Image: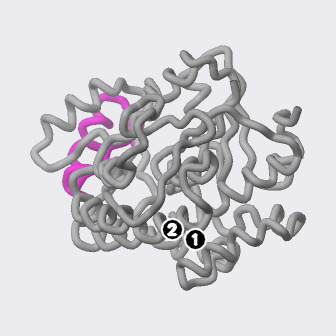
Amino acid sequence: MTISLFSGQGSQYPGMAGDIVKAMPELDRIFEAGSDILGRDLRAICLDSAPEELSRTINAQPAVMAVSMICLEAAKSKGYAFDGVAGHSLGEYAAMYASGVVSLEDAFRLIKARSEAMDAACNENKGEMAAILKTSPEKVEEVCAAAKNYAAAVNYNSPVQTVVAGTPEGIAEVSEVFAGLKARVVKLNVAGAFHSKLMQSAADSFYEAAKGITFNVPNVKYYSNVTGGKLTDFSDMASLLAKHIVSPVRFTSELNAMKNDGADRFVEFGPGKTLVGLVKKTLSDVAAEHVENLETLERAAIYE
């Protein structure tokens, strides 16, 4: 059983997937669709932006999603097929597109509303995120609960990596504690405290936009960050996606659920290979590859 995984925010870099679009100009339609809905040149944002401009939430989210879609479509053109999908945070939107839950255009309408709402929330409530490595999720939760300033575990990425989000003061406070515990602390290249209560205004705003979108039942298995398992109820996706903005990403649980369902091959689409690393740290006896450019597209042993 093959699972398509989709990269999250923070993985972006200038020029990503440029060589694929150059070699397969028909895939430029994805940039064109995004540009039409965003009202900005998405191709230029992906290929020509400076790193600091690309990292802005309103740019990074549609850019990473578009690149993930391009990489997937390039692989499908070579015969790639899959049985299920999962995304990490932002990656859930590419997963919805890949599984037929939303159309290409509606995926961009959703990500436009999400990125704008989250960008506004970042400006209202300053926040930060950091990955905590070499310590258990339970210890991370304990340290955050004891902090005087707000910090919370928000991304359960692997048995030895948990991401925390909070106010700048909260992240500084818990980072000092984790350093004392000999854990490794890595600050993330994001603009706010995603998946935490500091994003509540974004969730409320996004919900109003998401209510107008048509959501379909997927044509492959779909795994959710919010539930940590296979999603079977698609009757109120607007509420679920709004909740997703302020809820932890239960990626470790998702990976275990996929493995229990028979998944033995994982392919990450989009910039970087962060999710491949998380698969390898969490699961045994599975294959994991990534596709982000022409080299990895040609090298991947995923075509049957």
x then y, percent, for residue 104:
62, 63
Q: How far apart are marks 1 and 2 (CA)?
A: 6 Å
Mark 1 touches mark 2? (CB < 8 Å): yes
Disc 1 marks which residue?
A: 51
Disc 2 marks which residue?
A: 55
> Can you see residue 17?
yes
Element type at marker 1? helix
The range drawn in magenta is: 162-185
Q: How crowded is mark 2: few (under 14 residues within 10 Å), some or many (20 or more)?
A: many
Going 57% across and 33% down the picture, which residue do you hit? 221
x then y, percent, for residue 108:
54, 67
Residue 162 badge:
none
Q: Is residue 1 above or below residue 235?
A: above
> Can you see residue 132?
no
Going 20% across and 55% down the picture, which residue do you hit? 169
Going 44% across and 63% down the picture, which residue do you hit? 213
x then y, percent, for residue 266:
67, 32
